[in-house]
Each structure stands twice: as structure tokens, then as C-alpha cells.
Image (cartoon, rainbow, N blue to C red):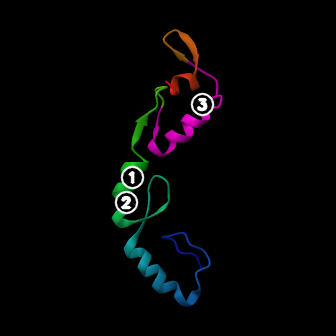
Amino acid sequence: MQCDFCIKKDIPAVNFIIHEIHCRRNIEICPYCSDSIPKSEMKNHIESEHVQVTCKCRMKMENSLLKDHEVEEAQGGRGSLLCCPVFIQHGWLCLL
């Protein structure tokens, strides 16, 4: 059986009711990323992972995506951005 709160699969039927009661009391599904998060940590999770930040290239994104974005752009990027009236390579701006 699968728990709808923690998304665990293959929970033995013998333990399922107790497992589900425990999860219902202690686990929440994040409304932004659908991860299972302990209720006591949900506020911190949202504030640290889902707060909007602005990259040096001026692109807005969730904080949890910023590191991958900077690495991806440093490795060649997806093209150029229009900054002032001149085109510049996105990766250059992010690494300033």
C-alpha cells in the first residue's frame, strides 16, 4: 500500500493504518514542490527553498533552483541576454 502523506510505497497492510495516522499528524505535502515535510519544518522549508531570489542575470526564481541555474549558465548557458542595448553571454553576468 502507498501512503498519501509521505509518498512511501509498499507499506505492509499490517502497518498501514498506524503508519497513515502517524503521517497524518506529522507530515505535510509542500504546496510548491510536493515533497513530504514534517509539519514542524514546513515554515523553514518554504522560507529556505521557495523564497523568490534574483540571479545576477536578473532572472527571478526559487532559491532552491539558483545553484543549478548558476552552474548551468557557467557551463555555457542557454544563449545571450539583452542587457542595456548590447547582447552579453548570460554565464558571464552570473559569475560577476
| Residue 74, numbered label | 3
Q: CA distance from mark 3 to mark 1?
A: 27 Å
What SS does tag 1 mark? helix
What amino acid type should be assigned to the residue bearing mark 3?
Ala
Q: Which residue is mark 2?
A: 42
- Residue at the spot 51% in from the left edge and 43% down from the top edge: 65
Query: Badge 3: few (under 14), some or many (20 or more) residues near its Cα, within 10 Å?
Result: some
Q: Is residue 29 above or below residue 92?
A: below
Rendering quarter of residue 79: top right
Are circles 2 and 3 on residues that touch, CB within 8 Å?
no
What amino acid type should be assigned to the residue bearing mark 2?
Met
What SS does tag 2 mark? helix
Label whose residue precedes the other's in the sequence (2 or 3) = 2
Q: Position of residue 86 (x, y in %)?
A: 55, 10
Residue 66 in magenta? Answer: yes
Q: Which residues are magenta?
A: 60-81
Residue closer to the observer: 93 or 62: 93
Q: Which residue is mark 1?
A: 46
- Residue at the spot 34% in from the left edge and 65% down from the top edge: 40
Q: CA distance from mark 2 to mark 3?
A: 32 Å
What amino acid type should be assigned to the residue bearing mark 1?
Ile
For this orientation, the residue located farthest to the bottom is: 14
Q: Position of residue 88 (x, y in %)?
A: 57, 16
Label whose residue precedes the other's in the sequence (3 or 1) = 1
- Residue at the spot 44% in from the left edge and 58% down from the top edge: 30
Q: For this view, does 29 lie left or right of residue 88? A: left
Rendering quarter of residue 44: bottom left
Q: For this view, does 35 lie left or right of residue 74? A: left
Are circles 2 and 1 on residues that touch, CB within 8 Å?
yes
Q: Position of residue 24 (x, y in %)?
A: 41, 75
Q: For this view, does 37 lie left or right of residue 40? A: right
Query: Badge 2: few (under 14), some or many (20 or more) residues near its Cα, within 10 Å?
Result: some
